[in-house]
Image: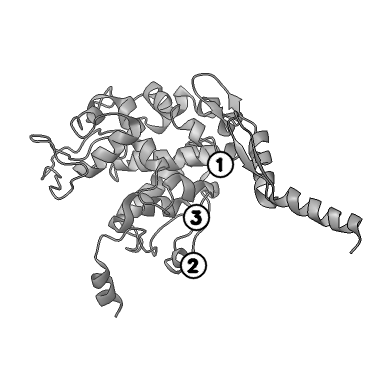
């Protein structure tokens, strides 16, 4: 082989496999064929700052929530929350929601995709909130979907929701862990995890979720944005398209869309039970809010229900499942 050709091959090999260490710098780039393109793309990714609401993130380059969701719209969505018969009069307000959202907008909460997707995610999240805090019923004034944010805590808890077997978040003596918040939190281990997520001591002070609306919204948004187990998606992920179903997901009829958000948040408490009222009422709130926001329920997306979905985290044991399927 000619020396010139051999040198050219040697040089090419070295360029592909060479390790360039930036001594005294902040990074060591391994220049393989794949990682160079990745590092270059990351270095060129645009980051935007929009003040207190959203800063230091690519998601802040999109509209922020206050660009498309105003006080009057919040009042319209939750029109009956301060009615005399409501149970949390004066508690929930727009300002508390926006302050809480500012912590999660840089992570993509209602700032992912185009404006329509952003508004759809807002309505999806609030659809859960409205359904879980509603005191509406079939013949209620304004209809059952007009009564979201009527509650901020469980009215007549029949237990303290203390799991004494959980050592990571042990129950605090004299503290009850009944449902509180915008997407109600139950059990000591859920209060402990949410508290760590939002940097509030909810394990010792679960009452914060019924005393401070900002913290209550923060806990709900943290739950929306956070996977409960490794290698599982968050409700945010399954809604905005960040999640790609595996073969097992497809076999379990788990597909991206609003239906999967119910699966992530509630599992087989709601999903896999056919078209039950507990599921339908959440879908109704989501679609009602889409209409009020001017998006329209016709844009509520595919896979809106979880009627036939297998739970991401079944509440029954594997041997129970085997007995059921045998």
Which residue: 37% across, 30% down? Answer: 79
Which residue: 25% across, 34% down? Answer: 151
Residue that numbered label 1 is attached to? 117
**Extreme residue toward the front, this view:** 3
Q: Are marks 3 and 2 in contact (CB under 8 Å)?
A: no
Callout 3: helix, strand or loop? loop
The part of the image, by quadrant, that contains residue 84 is top left
Which residue: 31% across, 40% down? Answer: 183
Neighbours of disc 1 within 10 Å: few (<14), some (14-19), many (20+)? many
Front residue of 250 and 227:
227
Instruction: Judge whether residue 141 can be spotted in this image.
Output: no
Residue that numbered label 2 is attached to? 247
* Cα distance in 3D space between marks 3 and 1: 14 Å
* Cα distance in 3D space between marks 2 and 1: 26 Å
Residue 54, relative to residue 14: is it above or below? Answer: above
Residue 50, relative to residue 320: is it above or below? Answer: above
Q: In the displayed structure, does residue 153 sit left or right of residue 30?
A: left
Residue that numbered label 3 is attached to? 256
Q: In the displayed structure, does residue 256 sit left or right of residue 92?
A: right
Mark in the foreground, 3 or 2: 2
Q: In the displayed structure, does residue 52 sit left or right of residue 150?
A: right
Residue 82, relative to residue 277: is it above or below? Answer: above
Which residue: 46% across, 44% down? Answer: 236
Q: Earlier in the sequence, mark 2 or mark 1?
A: 1
Callout 2: helix, strand or loop? helix
């Amino acid at each position: 082989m000619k020396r010139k050709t051999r040198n050219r091959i040697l040089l090419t090999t070295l360029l592909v496999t060479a390790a360039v260490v930036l001594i005294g710098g902040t990074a060591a780039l391994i220049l393989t064929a794949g990682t160079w393109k990745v590092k270059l793309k990351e270095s060129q990714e645009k980051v935007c700052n929009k003040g207190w609401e959203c800063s230091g993130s690519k998601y802040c380059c999109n509209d922020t929530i206050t660009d498309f969701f105003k006080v009057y719209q919040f009042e319209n969505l939750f029109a009956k929350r301060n009615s005399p018969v409501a149970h949390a009069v004066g508690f929930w307000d727009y300002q508390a929601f926006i302050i809480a959202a500012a912590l999660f907008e840089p992570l993509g909460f209602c700032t992912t995709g185009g404006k329509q997707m952003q508004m759809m995610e807002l309505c999806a999240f609030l659809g859960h909130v409205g359904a879980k805090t509603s005191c509406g019923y079939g013949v209620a004034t304004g209809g059952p979907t007009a009564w979201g944010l009527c509650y901020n805590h469980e009215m007549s808890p029949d237990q303290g929701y203390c799991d004494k077997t959980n050592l990571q978040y042990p129950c605090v003596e004299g503290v009850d862990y009944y449902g509180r918040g915008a997407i109600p939190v139950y059990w000591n281990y859920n209060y402990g995890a949410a508290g760590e997520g939002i940097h509030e001591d909810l394990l010792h002070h679960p009452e914060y979720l019924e005393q401070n609306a900002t913290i209550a919204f923060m806990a709900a948004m943290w739950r929306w944005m956070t996977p409960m187990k490794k290698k599982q998606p968050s409700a945010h992920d399954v809604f905005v398209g960040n999640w790609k179903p595996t073969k097992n997901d497809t076999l379990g009829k788990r597909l991206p869309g609003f239906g999967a958000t119910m699966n992530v948040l509630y599992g087989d408490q709601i999903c896999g039970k056919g078209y039950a009222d507990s599921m339908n009422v959440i879908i109704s709130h989501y679609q009602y809010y889409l209409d009020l926001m001017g998006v329209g329920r016709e844009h509520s997306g595919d896979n809106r229900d979880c009627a036939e979905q297998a739970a991401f985290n079944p509440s029954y044991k594997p041997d129970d499942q085997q007995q059921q399927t045998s």
